[in-house]
Image: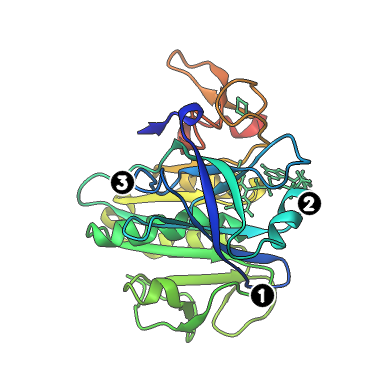
């Protein structure tokens, strides 16, 4: 399930690097290896520039085994991502790929509610489409305070059992697969839920009957405050799930302990575990949220 990063070094060639919003890009990389193994929740550790000692971690948004490509959805925040924004088709770099533990499917008969915040959308986009292919009833909720990075459309896939937004918009990427997605924002945007994405999740769960709620599994990725709020929603409704944690990373292969997070262990205590090799995906109930 978890990919051993140290042996996953490969080259990567930029096929395109498309600007989606003022600060967000969609990067497609051709990679001679690591594409077939890539699963939702895995990430790559990408060398952005020779002047930067450390690579930077990015979740895999999509993979195409036939074409040998990986897609990355990234936001420019600092030096490394600024270098990436300047990459043109044909640019070559190296990376570790794929790394980490991926999301696990829900048990048979369960449904999935995916809750994403901002750039945390990347691994959940990939996972939503995989779940749908495998016949899992899936809903994707995205909290967004900036311009939508991907095309939106009027939703034709109603949420079951409760529609919390009048004339909701949905992500075309998901809608084309028949996956209902809903967006939340604090800006008044038509077709969006007004508020936190975690409030939207709570509203939907509240409207479910007990049987449907008990069969719902949450999958979460986003900024830490959002993930903490989503973990509280899980506790409130007594449901389980998984979360993809984000920590600053150095080596990316378990050698430096620079990326640790507090995770419960078997004897009711907790220990620091490495997000790069033991995660980034952890069981929601195992994360010691008040120590993050
Ligand atoms: C498992 C994992 C998956 C990720 N997936 C994505 C993704 O799909 N798309 C994406 O855009 N970003 C993703 N990130 C975050 C991304 O790695 C950082 O934004 C990137 O390393 C910043 O590099 P930089 O050199 O541009 O910025 P730096 O100059 O290193 O930092 C600029 C700012 O970003 C913050 N930052 C740096 N690294 C991280 C980090 N790991 N987590 C949170 N904040 C950070 C710094 O505190 C600083 O404020 C992921 C991180 C992890 C750990
Ligand atoms: S980044 Fe070095 S152990 Fe995780």
Task: Identify the residue under disc 1.
Answer: 147
Asked if the residue at label 2 sits under 8 Å from ligand 1, the reply is yes
Residue 248 drawn above or below residue 161: above
Task: Identify the residue under disc 2.
Answer: 78
- Which residue is pictured at 74% across the width and 34% down the height? 53
- Which residue is pictured at 53% across the width and 15% down the height? 269
Residue nearest the viewer, comparing 255 with 124: 255
Is label 3 in contact with label 2 (beta carbons under 8 Å)? no
Helix, strand or loop under label 2: loop
Image coords of residue 216 (percent x, y): 34, 52
Residue nearest the viewer, comparing 197 with 68: 68
Residue 176 drawn above or below residue 219: below
Residue 105 is marked as 3
Residue 287 drawn above or below residue 211: above
Between marks 1 and 2, how big is the CA–CA gap?
Answer: 20 Å
Image coords of residue 278 (percent x, y): 48, 28
Q: What is the quadrant of residue 18 in the picture?
A: bottom right
- Which residue is pictured at 57% across the width and 18% down the height? 271
Between marks 3 and 2, how big is the CA–CA gap?
Answer: 34 Å
Residue 113 in view of the camera: no
Asked if the residue at label 1 sits under 8 Å from ligand 1, the reply is no
Between marks 3 and 1, how big is the CA–CA gap?
Answer: 31 Å
Is label 3 in contact with label 1 (beta carbons under 8 Å)? no
Q: Earlier in the sequence, mark 3 or mark 2?
A: 2
Residue 216 in view of the camera: yes
Image coords of residue 209 (percent x, y): 31, 60
On screen, residue 97 versus residue 186, left or right, reads left
Identify the image quadrant of the C terminus.
Answer: top right
Q: Mark 2, residues whose alpha carbon is within 10 Å: few (<14), some, or many (≥20)?
A: few
């Amino acid at each position: 399930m978890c990919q051993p990063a140290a042996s996953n070094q490969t080259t990567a060639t930029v096929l395109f690097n498309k600007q989606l919003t003022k600060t967000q890009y969609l990067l497609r990389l051709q990679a001679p290896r690591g594409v077939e193994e890539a699963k939702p929740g895995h990430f790559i550790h990408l060398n952005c520039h020779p002047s930067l000692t450390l690579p930077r971690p990015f979740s895999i948004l999509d993979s195409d085994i036939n074409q040998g490509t990986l897609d990355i959805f990234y936001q420019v925040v600092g030096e490394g991502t600024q270098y990436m924004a300047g990459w043109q088709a044909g640019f070559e770099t190296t990376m570790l790929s794929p790394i980490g533990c991926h999301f696990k499917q829900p048990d048979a008969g369960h449904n999935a509610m995916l809750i994403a915040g901002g750039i945390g959308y990347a691994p959940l986009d990939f996972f939503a489409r995989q779940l749908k292919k495998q016949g899992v009833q899936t809903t994707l909720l995205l909290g967004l305070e900036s311009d939508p990075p991907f095309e939106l459309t009027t939703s034709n896939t109603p949420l079951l059992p409760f529609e919390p937004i009048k004339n909701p918009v949905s992500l075309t990427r998901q809608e084309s697969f028949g996956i209902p997605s809903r967006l939340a924002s604090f800006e008044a945007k038509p077709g969006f839920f007004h508020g936190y994405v975690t409030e939207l999740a709570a509203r939907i769960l509240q409207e479910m009957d007990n049987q449907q709620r008990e069969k719902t599994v949450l999958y979460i990725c986003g900024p830490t405050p959002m993930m903490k709020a989503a973990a509280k929603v899980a506790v409130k409704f007594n449901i389980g799930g998984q979360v993809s944690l984000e920590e600053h990373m150095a080596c990316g292969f378990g050698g430096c302990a620079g990326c640790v997070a507090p995770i419960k262990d078997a004897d009711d205590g907790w220990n620091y575990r490495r997000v790069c090799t033991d995660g980034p995906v952890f069981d929601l109930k195992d994360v010691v949220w008040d120590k993050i």
